[in-house]
Image: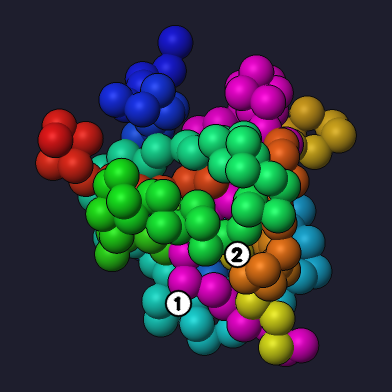
Amino acid sequence: MSAKDKYGRTLIRVVGRGLTAKEWIAHNERLGMKLSRDTLELLSLPDYDENHRLECGKAYTVVLMRSDELTRHNDAYRISWNFQIRSARDYGRSPDLRAELAFLLREKISSKRMKKWGALCIIVLHDQIIDRHEKPNFFGVISSGNGQVEVCSFANPNDAPWSQFSAFAFPVSDKELKS
């Protein structure tokens, strides 16, 4: 049974590794996990190493917000900005909202568990990484057809609605969870 917060959202504990992009690529290769061409491209940009690594050895609590929390309005309401606003309202804006969370979640969450939650993907709505086509990207995890959970990138403009089968990961402080 997963831990839940006061809103009934799933909580997951991960520990930061602070790995560079090259180290994450090598780590995934050792585990037999292939990263998509787009993910590799984003990792090749200096933005990842400069802005998206977490503190090595530090524990983080991550909350999963399901996309159906916002669908009661309408599907068009399911955009990145609205999830970020909801998270900031409920937990505050964390400086630990970084892309490395996607790699840590991939190791913590099984495809079976994602299916149980009704989520095909979990997106970390960190500060966007802009690709060579000037498109904003987020890292997240997706449940693949072979039963594995893989890190991938999601190019999604701010006004494009996310799938109803998405979930969003936000780090929260223990202080915020107790209030």
Where residue 97 is drawn, which disc sits there? Answer: none
Question: Which of the pair 157/75 is nearer the observer?
Answer: 75
Marks 2,1: beta carbons within 8 A: no
Whole-percent x, y for residue 57 in the image: 26, 50
Of the residues shown, which amino acid type is indicated by label 2? Answer: Phe
Does dot 2 land on a helix, a strand or a loop?
strand
Question: Which of the pair 132/119 is nearer the observer?
Answer: 119
Q: Is residue 90 magenta?
A: no
Does dot 1 land on a helix, a strand or a loop?
helix
Whole-percent x, y for residue 135 in the image: 70, 81
Provide the residue designation for mark 1.
49
Instruction: Let me know if residue 107 appears in the view.
Output: no
Query: How many other residues sit within 10 Å of disc 2, few (<14), some (14-19) or many (≥20)?
Result: many
Q: Which residues are magenta?
A: 106-133
Where 76 falls versus 163 (above or below)? below
Where residue 138 is drawn, which disc sits there? Answer: 2
Instruction: Let me know if residue 134 appears in the view.
Output: yes
In this rendering, the label closer to the viewer, 2 or 1: 2
Q: Residue furthest right?
A: 145
Q: Which of the marked residues, 2 or 1, is nearer the chain's N terminus? A: 1
Q: Place residue 107 in its image quadrant.
A: top right
Q: Place residue 22 in its image quadrant.
A: bottom right
Q: At 57% across and 42% down in the image, what residue appears? A: 70
